[in-house]
């Protein structure tokens, strides 16, 4: 994301300390993570202490303080998905992307994560890419799904 775009988001909330979370959400959505220097700009523009920005950014799981890929890939590892073959999904995603849980590839295409329960047990095992749920997933289907996110 360009610095110009980030600055535009920050300007929209300038002088509005009550809009801190909104500003961070918008930046996270566009940039996929919150660099320290951007959080400092937000603190200055919204007139809130940098420590408060850090506290919010590190408390909420939706925010990332490390770079993420353009596409976030999640495999559910909750009990229902586990019993329905989530381990095979994990192995296939790791094979296709070359990533382990929590990693981002070098060209920032994918960030791969697993989660204990992603909230859709009835359609497990489940793969989620950029918030889109792919239920009753099989290892054979994963490559076709990931190709959609070139």
Image (cartoon, rainbow, N blue to C red):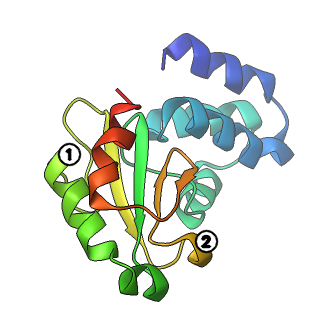
Quadrant for the C terminus, please. top left
Task: Please tell me whether mark 1 sits on a helix, a strand or a loop.
Answer: helix
- Placement of 46 over or under 111, stated as above or below: above
Task: Please tell me whether mark 2 sits on a helix, a strand or a loop.
Answer: loop
Q: Nearer the viewer, residue 24 or 109?
A: 109
- Placement of 115 over or under 98, stated as above or below: below
The residues bearing labels 2 and 1 have C-alpha atoms spaced at a distance of 24 Å
Q: Nearer the viewer, residue 23 or 36?
A: 23
Horizontal side, residue 110 vs residue 107: left or right? right
- Mark 2 or mark 1, which is nearer to you? 2
Residue, disc 2: 120
Residue drawn at point x = 29 percent, y = 65 percent: 89
Horizontal side, residue 10 vs residue 86: left or right? right
Residue, disc 1: 97
Q: Is residue 68 visible?
A: no
Residue drawn at point x = 59 percent, y = 48 percent: 50
Residue 115 screen position, x and y as percent? 44, 72
Horizontal side, residue 66 vs residue 93: left or right? right
Residue 107 screen position, x and y as percent? 23, 29
Residue drawn at point x = 27 percent, y = 46 percent: 104
């Amino acid at each position: 994301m360009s610095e110009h775009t980030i600055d535009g988001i920050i300007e929209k909330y300038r002088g509005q300390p009550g809009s801190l979370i909104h500003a961070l959400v918008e930046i996270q959505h566009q940039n996929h993570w919150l660099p320290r220097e951007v959080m400092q700009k937000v603190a200055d523009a919204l007139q809130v202490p940098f420590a408060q920005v850090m506290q919010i950014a590190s408390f909420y799981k939706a925010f990332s303080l490390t770079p993420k890929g353009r596409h976030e890939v999640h495999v559910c590892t909750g009990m229902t998905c586990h019993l329905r073959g989530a381990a095979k999904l994990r192995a296939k995603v790791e094979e296709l992307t070359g990533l382990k849980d929590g990693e981002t590839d070098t060209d920032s295409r994918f960030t791969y994560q697993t989660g204990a329960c992603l909230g859709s047990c009835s359609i497990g095992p489940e793969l989620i890419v950029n918030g889109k749920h792919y239920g009753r997933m099989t290892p054979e289907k994963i490559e076709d799904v990931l190709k959609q996110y070139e």
